Image (cartoon, rainbow, N blue to C red):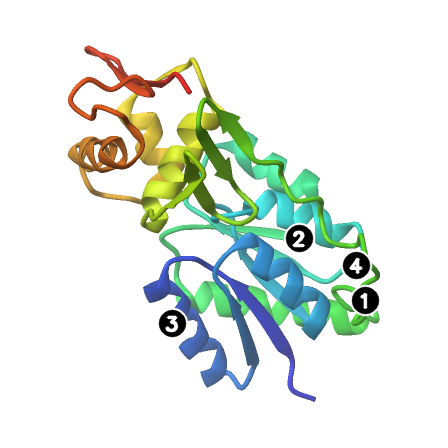
Amino acid sequence: MQAQILVVEDDPTLLDTLTYNLEKQHYAVVAATDGWQAVALAQKHRPDLIILDWMLPGLDGLEVCRFIRQKSSVPILMLTARTAELDKVLGLEIGADDYITKPFSMRELLARVKAHLRRSRLAGGQPAASPSPEAGDLPKAPPPLVFDGLVIDPARREVRRGGQVVRLKPKEFELLLFLARHRGMVLSREIILKRVWGWEFSGGSRTVDVHIRWLREKIEDDPAHPQRIVTVRGAGYRFEG
């Protein structure tokens, strides 16, 4: 019987590459590009194995792993650029079965997929989740962040200013959400790059400056004299709310 694999990856190029190579091995592939979608598809399709990226919009990979592991012993292979031992331990403690760091060999990944599927079959693997989840099975949606005239809703991926929806690009939203969740903290450009764009991102810190400027044009009363996202000279940025 053809094994079904859920691939959760927000990088479209890597997602296409993984899908292509897995299908060449005659696996059925279901794809998700964010954490909330991953949870829903795991419940609907009950895959035989999950390849799960750590850095995701919405719920991150650890939260997705934690939720699925409460319901099933489906093999979960974490895919990430994080190499620190502490990060690996954390992923395994949350419930991941294996851990492979980017960049990786596709041959190695396929070998690990095959090995985990074989072990799962021998152990009588369980489905990823109930095919008909009851109300309340999904993880609780994070509440909106509310500031003076500004509402950031992570679950809806929506920002409202003065009651009007502010149209943001995906990275603009993720950047604003990251800043808002660390209100009052000075965040360096390097930290912002790693947490919003990912550890494997090769662009320079200018990327952060450009996106900050775009955000200010959309959420500040006077973008030239920002009050919500302030620059801390020589250190980075701080969100004031």
Q: Is residue 120 left or right of residue 175?
A: right
Residue 107 appears in the figure:
yes
* Residue holding disc 1: 130
**Label 1: element kind:** loop
Cβ–Cβ under 8 Å for marks 1 and 2: no
Q: CA distance from mark 2 to mark 4?
A: 12 Å
- Pointer 3 or 2: first along the chain: 3
Q: Is residue 137 left or right of residue 108?
A: right
The disc placed on residue 72 is 4
* Residue holding disc 2: 97
Q: CA distance from mark 1 to mark 2?
A: 20 Å
Q: Nearer the viewer, residue 225 or 204?
A: 225
Residue drawn where x is 42% and y is 20% of the image: 241
The disc placed on residue 16 is 3
Q: Position of residue 22 (x, y in %)?
A: 49, 77
- Pointer 1 or 4: first along the chain: 4
**Label 2: element kind:** loop
